[in-house]
Image (cartoon, rainbow, N blue to C red):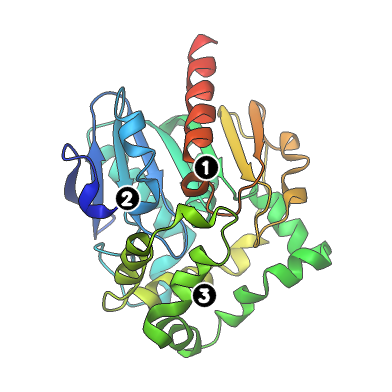
């Protein structure tokens, strides 16, 4: 599925939230389902979920600040998690809703976890894909040598200019490689898909903005105390994840009162793109079971 082949019922819109102009794609009517992508992606990562859940929701897939067509503030501090949380609250309210079903993958997952703690009353349900609970990730960065090695890039991203150069060289080859070479399901990413991700990263200021998420939040990973979250939560995990170990999910129930966890085999970090049918089935099952309670 390419960008040009997407459902004609999907609309591209903009909204100003927290003084930043954000782009999003939307489809459907009903309760709000807000989708937050990860690094180095954009709204397109949810191309298989948008039409499925637009059957009974108003689905909104954001370009996070700094990404693709969304505004790109220049200060590193503009990408601190406190600002990202304000973005999400402003989007929910700006769209005319009091709450939503929040879905996040990778960095979007981290924002979703943090938003759930900051504003639990704004969430009906939380769905996180391949991003561990922040407390589990923080502990792993201190005590798990394997995860420390896997997370080497966090330190690399603190350097000025060099990470941007690395991603930009060879026609944004590192962007394409992150998907095409790291995926377990190689067929999940067509040449058109890779082109779309490279084009999104090529927007002026986008690479620096994307990397500024890491530059602005290094201490955020380890500096907060996490209580018990009282929001119904689904955690989906591709077992082959190259960046985050499966063991980071163990014990998540210590921090989440109402938790479902499902593991997907033959699937890497790009879970909703590599195994979209399974992801959609688990998401649908979670929504139905939560409604029945």
In the rendered image, which residue does mark 1 sit on?
A: 275
Label disc, if present, on residue 215 of the rendered structure: 3
Q: Which residue does the numbered mark 2 point to in the structure image?
A: 62
Q: CA distance from mark 3 to mark 1?
A: 31 Å
Q: At 41% from the left edge and 49% from the top edge, which residue is drawn?
A: 36
Q: CA distance from mark 1 to mark 2?
A: 21 Å
In which quadrant will I find the C terminus? top right
Q: Which mark is residue 163?
A: none
Compared with 164, 209 (above or below) is above
Marks 1, 2: nearer the viewer: 1
Residue 152 is situated, as x and y percent measured from the top left of the image, at 67, 75
In the picture provided, is 272 more to the left or to the right than 131?
A: left
> Residue 217: percent from the left, percent from the top?
54, 67
Q: Earlier in the sequence, mark 3 or mark 1?
A: 3
Disc number lying in front (3 or 2): 2
Residue at figure coordinates x 60%, y 55% from the top left: 184
How dense is the environment of label 1, judged by Cα within 10 Å: few (below 14), some, or many (20 and up)?
some
The numbered mark, 3 or 2, whose residue comes first in the sequence reads: 2
């Amino acid at each position: 599925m390419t960008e040009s082949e997407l459902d004609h019922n999907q609309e591209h819109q903009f909204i100003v939230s927290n003084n930043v102009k954000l782009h999003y794609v939307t489809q459907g009517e009903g309760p709000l389902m807000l989708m937050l992508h990860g690094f180095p992606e954009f709204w397109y990562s949810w191309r298989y979920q948008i039409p499925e859940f637009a059957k009974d929701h108003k689905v909104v897939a954001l370009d996070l600040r700094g990404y693709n067509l969304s505004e790109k503030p220049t200060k590193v501090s503009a990408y601190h998690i406190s600002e990202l949380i304000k973005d999400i609250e402003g989007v929910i309210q700006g769209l005319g809703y009091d709450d939503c079903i929040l879905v996040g993958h990778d960095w979007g997952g981290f924002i979703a976890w943090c938003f759930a703690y900051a504003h639990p009353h704004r969430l009906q349900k939380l769905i996180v894909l391949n991003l561990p609970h922040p407390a589990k990730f923080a502990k792993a960065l201190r005590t798990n040598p394997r995860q420390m090695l896997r997370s080497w890039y966090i330190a690399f991203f603190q350097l000025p200019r060099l990470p941007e150069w690395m991603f930009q060289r060879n026609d944004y080859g590192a962007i394409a490689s992150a998907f095409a070479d790291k995926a377990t399901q190689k067929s999940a990413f067509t040449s058109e898909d890779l082109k779309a991700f490279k084009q999104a990263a090529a927007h002026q200021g986008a690479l620096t903005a994307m990397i500024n998420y890491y530059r602005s939040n290094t201490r955020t990973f380890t500096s907060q105390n996490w209580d018990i979250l009282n929001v119904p939560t689904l955690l989906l995990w591709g077992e082959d994840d190259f960046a985050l170990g499966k063991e980071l999910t163990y014990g998540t129930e210590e921090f989440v009162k109402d938790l479902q966890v499902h593991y997907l085999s033959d699937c890497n970090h790009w879970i909703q793109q590599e195994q979209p049918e399974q992801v959609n089935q688990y998401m649908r099952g979670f929504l139905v079971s939560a409604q029945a309670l």
